[in-house]
Image: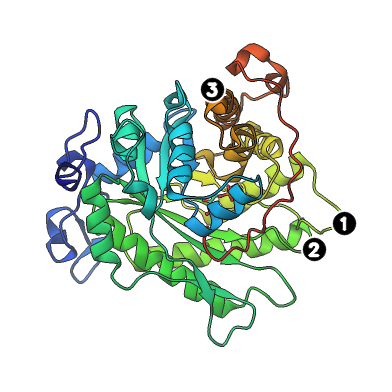
Amino acid sequence: MASRRGGTILPGASRQSLGRAPPRQLSAQWGALRFIGDGWEEHMPTMPGLDQTARAIVADGKGILAADETVSTITKRLTARAIESTSDSRRAYREMLFSTPDIAAFIGGVILQDETIRQDSSTGIPLLELLVGRGIIPGIKVDTGVHPLAGAPGEFVAEGLDGLRARLEEYHELGARFAKWRAVFIIRDGLPTAKCIHANAHALARYAALCQEQGLVPIVEPEVLMEGAHALEQCEDVTGRVLQAVFNELFDAQVSLEGMLLKPNMVTAGLRCARQASVDEVAEATLRALTRHVPPAVPGVVFLSGGQDAVLATEHLNAINALGGPKPWKLSFSYGRALQDEAMEVWRGQREQVPAAQRMFHHRAGCDSAAALGRYSGDMEGEAGFAGAAEPPSIHHEPDSTLHTQH
Ligand code: 13P
């Protein structure tokens, strides 16, 4: 334990170079100054260490494995497959994913949650060090879930700001180098309200500023949920309004855009919409929303999968990357279900299934990696040799709701 609290250093990078910024009151030491007519003012600083970490996570063909489901969410997913959820089975499941051979070619970062970041592997090394040893950057989910927003019936606000500075400090000591905070927005008659958008955008910005102060790259995740009967156009409108509000707040909070990653939803029709959009329509609407509302200084946009089928999530990402026009950010993935569902189905909690489940995970991550480069093709799904993947499993469970209050 003592060695873990001593801080884990990423391969090839000193703690200093990982960009732990001094507290804000010392910001003149790292912030840039500019003259604005009647005096000098600090403008949005760049933080070299944070930039470097953010870019390393989304280096060519790499994305993020979101393995930060809370105990209650992962328990739902395990029990849906008749797998008992205990701290040991959760550890075994995550260890199976993290120790997949050669996975670091596709995965630049893994988002953990509080239980996992403190767990040891079956061979006694911390799970976090298992990742670091393979060149994968560990991150941590730090919001404490979404709760009903007062005065806004049917809407939610992500909480967790109280005491966040101390928690971030501890997570940094444990070895985390980035963090995640997820806000959710529902599309329904009159929703989301401006109040809900503002409350969540403000909290995201306060979280992001605190992360950078503590030397962690913030992943800013405003998720417009897929649940609902809304059309693609409504999703595009709401996604645009949400992104605009988030970047306004990030600007006011002086968050360094170069030292963050954005994790948005793709622009899709609601799951209950009678007319589902084509892959190309999703790609075009998604890129349009990003082009209009996301500053080019942001190094990476890592999409959530939000309940999309795994192959469709790959196809959408590929189509977005294959579009022409300016794309100043890396466009990659930070998938939870779309990366894990097939592997969990194969694993089923059985030790002898670990190699087959790892092949399945490697295959899906390889397809998503190709999609992040715009080089995916449907032929890869059938390529037995691509990742040594076995027959894809047939998955019969009902997709769980994205409106779980904790990811
Ligand atoms: P999904 O890809 O399953 O939506 O999960 C991503 C995530 O991290 C949601 O917070």
Q: Mark 2 points at which residue?
A: 229
The amino acid at mark 1 is Ala
Q: Which comes before the other along the chain, label 1 or label 2?
A: 2
For the residue labelled by badge 2, is the local secondary structure a helix, a strand or a loop? loop
Q: Distance between the residues labelled 3 and 1?
A: 40 Å
Answer whether residue 170 is visible to the viewer in this image.
yes
Q: Do the residues labelled 3 and 1 touch (CB within 8 Å)?
A: no
Q: In which quarter of the image is residue 37?
A: bottom left
Q: Mark 3 points at which residue?
A: 355
- Pick whichever, 190 or 401, lies toward us: 401
Q: Which residue is drawn at 34% across and 45% down?
A: 119
Q: Do the residues labelled 1 and 2 touch (CB within 8 Å)?
A: yes
- x, y percent for residue 235: 70, 60
Q: Residues within 10 Å of mark 2 (few under 14, many from 20)?
A: some
Q: How far apart are marks 1 and 2 (CA)?
A: 7 Å
For the residue labelled by badge 3, is the local secondary structure a helix, a strand or a loop? helix
Q: Name the residue under label 1.
A: 274
The amino acid at mark 2 is Ala
- x, y percent for residue 365: 55, 30
- x, y percent for residue 197: 54, 72
Q: Nearer the viewer, mark 3 or mark 1?
A: 3
Q: How crowded is mark 3: few (under 14 residues within 10 Å), some or many (20 or more)?
A: some
